[in-house]
Amino acid sequence: MRRLFNYFIRGLIVTAPLALTLYVCWDLFQRVDRWLGLSIPGAGFVITLLLITLVGFLASNLLTRGAVSAVERLLQRLPFVRLLYGSTRDLLSAFVGEKRRFETPVLLTLTPGEGVQVLGFVTAESLEVLGLRGYVAVYVPQSYGFSGNLLVVPSTRVRPLEADSADVMAFIVSGGISTSLKR
């Protein structure tokens, strides 16, 4: 009986994430199709991907780059819109843009001599512009969420890690149970 229970648990561990992923993708397809009024399942998602790619092409094109810059300047003048648009753009750029920010995983010593350390990513090598000579900005993501804390710490408390930044992020976000760092 114990063996059957273990098989069930192992099957649940394999099936639940797969089912959840498929459900979320299917629900996303359905919603986009409803928003666009399409009856072909998944067509709205494909159209959305194509439109996003077209916008990316136009934003990279020399002829339309000026128009994109003008729209961005306009958005930067509106107080609430500036906060929302700028933060979203910066966050996406930090993960997938040309100016990735989560490239330097580090181990941060919180209290010298105590042994308490956290994993994070250096997002600014120098904070002299803020009058903080010898300090760096370290982003510490939280487990099981898309939030985190920005810590300003002396650079002497930061030690770079010899690890892939995507693996370190997966390890942190999973609460330390991701197998991506385990060998």
Image: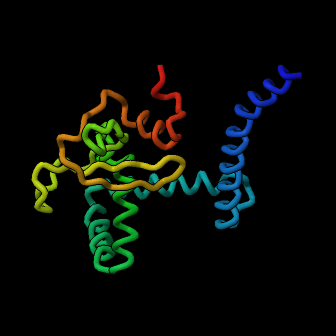
- Left-right relation of 141 to 158: right
Residue 133, image x, y percentages: 10, 53
Residue 147, image x, y percentages: 45, 56
Residue 172, image x, y percentages: 46, 40
| Quadrant location, the N terminus | top right
Relative to residue 18, is residue 153 depicted above or below?
below
Depth order, front residue of 48/1: 1
Name the residue at 41% across, 54% down: 148
Relative to residue 140, is residue 1 depicted above or below?
above
Residue 85, image x, y percentages: 38, 68
User: In which image quadrant can residue 130 be found?
Assistant: bottom left
Q: How is the image coloured?
A: rainbow
- Left-right relation of 104 to 11: left
- Left-right relation of 131 to 157: left
User: In which image quadrant can residue 115 be found?
Assistant: top left
Name the residue at 47% across, 38% down: 170
- Left-right relation of 156 to 50: left
Q: Residue furthest right?
A: 1
Q: Residue furthest bottom?
A: 78
Name the residue at 65% across, 67% down: 35
Number of labels in the image equals: 0
Q: Residue furthest front?
A: 114
Q: Is residue 67 visible?
A: yes
Depth order, front residue of 106/28: 106
Name the residue at 24% across, 54% down: 152
User: In which image quadrant can residue 81 be found?
Assistant: bottom left
Depth order, front residue of 167/56: 167
Q: Is residue 105 visible?
A: no
